[in-house]
Image (cartoon, rainbow, N blue to C red):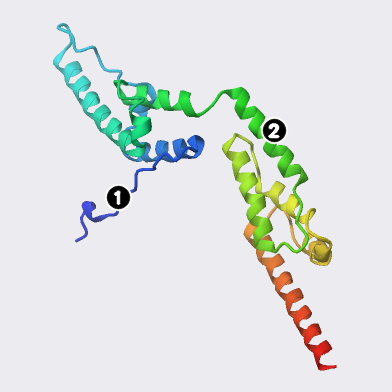
Amino acid sequence: MTSESSFVQPAIPRFNGHYDHWSMLMENFLRSKEYWNLVETGITAGSGGAESSDLQKKALEEQKLKDLKAKNYLFQAIDCAILETILKKETAKDIWDSLKQKYQGTARVKRAQLQALRKEFEVLHMKAGEIVNDYFGRTLVIANKMRLHGERMEDMVIIEKILRSMTSKYDYVVCSIEESNDLDALSIDELQSSLLVHEQRVSRQVVDEQALQVTY
């Protein structure tokens, strides 16, 4: 019989400087351990004073133990340089709030970053000689950054952007895709696959033409 302890435990997300991405992963990790509520709201049991009931005291001790475990996960997620700046923080909530204040940035900075990403996405076009996979990679990197900054970036928006910004040698296949598919139901992976097939077909034609020229 397979025991519960034999399952692979999820790795603790390491903070690499990208706060928004890390905080999303870390929150999910702490939720899976059932510690997130404590990190979010702090210790909420009674003060544990002389007038507290035994039940209140027990609840407080349980929360303190959970808080220590949550702090341990947070300590393991950050490197020594950052750890030294938060050693005096007493609870997991204190640590989380401190990291958020230090690394998330102000709302004004985030708005400016999102505006710059929107502009970059707007002017994005496929470069001459660029292959399909590379262009999809560049586009998705920008789109995912926009999402991390709070933009509601639907797949449909990305699909439409790619279709209208391909180089002219893809005009035929782009028209074919738009005429034969419901773009609302088309996935990014399906679009990429269709364009890759066209790219490979064009490449084979070029090779065949070059071979014929050499023959004659």
Task: Sort mark 1 into few (<14), some (14-19) or many (20+) by Cα contacts within 10 Å.
Answer: few
Q: Nearer the viewer, residue 105 or 201?
A: 105
Q: Nearer the viewer, residue 12 or 60?
A: 12
Q: Nearer the viewer, residue 179 or 27?
A: 27
Q: Earlier in the sequence, mark 1 or mark 2?
A: 1
Secondary structure, mark 2, is helix
Between tags 1 and 2, which lies in front?
2
Q: In the picture, residue 70 is in which quadrant?
A: top left
Amino acid type, residue under disc 2 in the picture? Gln
Q: In the picture, residue 105 is in which quadrant?
A: top right
198 vs 34: above or below: below
Q: Quadrant of the N terminus?
A: bottom left
Residue in view at x 34 percent, y 48 percent: 10
Q: Position of residue 170 (x, y in %)?
A: 80, 64
Asked whether, in this view, residue 143 is left or right of residue 173, the answer is left
Q: Position of residue 143 (x, y in %)?
A: 64, 45
Q: Which residue is mark 2?
A: 115
Q: Which residue is mark 1?
A: 9
Secondary structure, mark 1, is loop
Asked whether, in this view, residue 3 is left or right of residue 76, the answer is left
Q: CA distance from mark 1 to mark 2?
A: 39 Å
Mark seen at residue 55: none
Residue in view at x 63 percent, y 55 percent: 137
Q: Position of residue 44 (x, y in %)?
A: 30, 18
Residue 114 visible at all: yes
